[in-house]
Amino acid sequence: QVRLVESGGGLVQAGGSLRLSCAASGRTFSGYVMGWFRQAPGREREFVAAIGWSLARLYYSDSVKGRFTLSRDNAKNTVYLQMNSLKPEDTAVYYCAADAGFFISRRPDEYDYWGQGTQVTVSS
């Protein structure tokens, strides 16, 4: 069992920055693919970014590429999502997720564990 706790959400003006953190506890953190997803009201949960065991395996959605940076610190059992140049369309609940598989998936149903989510609101 893996427990994930997100933090760092909040209200920010367009063009601003936030850094989300996801602290994991339970099984060996370094063995999991870690992903971030987001869900806006009335919309499906969508892939944002994911990182594999090796830091070289790193993927972003086209909508955040160049603005968001995902990293992980296996010694601290934590992943970080640095979000810069935020836009109103980035407003959503952001979820951290863990997948015990090897391949990085963009599908929410491939992930085994989820955090409770943290709200990010970007005002125009």
Image (cartoon, grey):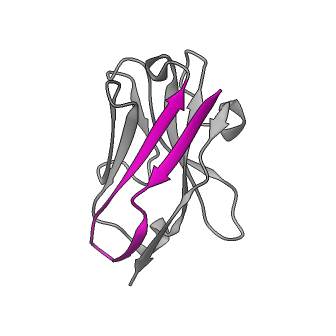
123, above or below 22, in the image = below
Residue 10 part of the magenta-drawn span: yes
Quadrant for the C terminus, please.
bottom left
Residue at the image point whose x is 61% and y is 53% from the top: 116
- Residue most toward the bottom? 124
**Residue 106 at x, y = what percent?**
59, 36
Residue 64 or 54: which is nearer the viewer?
54
Residue 8 or 17: which is nearer the viewer?
8
Residue 2 placement: quadrant: top right
Residue at the image point whose x is 33% and y is 23% from the top: 55
The boundaries of the magenta stretch are 1-26
10, above or below 20, in the image = below
Left or right side of 121 for 46? right
Residue at the image point whose x is 51% and y is 32% from the top: 25
**Residue 93 at x, y = what percent?**
56, 62
Residue 92 or 78: which is nearer the viewer?
78
Left or right side of 53 for 38? right
Residue 3 placement: quadrant: top right
Quadrant for the N terminus, please.
top right
Q: Give the dominant element type of the magenta stretch: helix, strand or loop.
A: strand
**Residue 14 at x, y = what percent?**
33, 76
Left or right side of 64 for 41? right
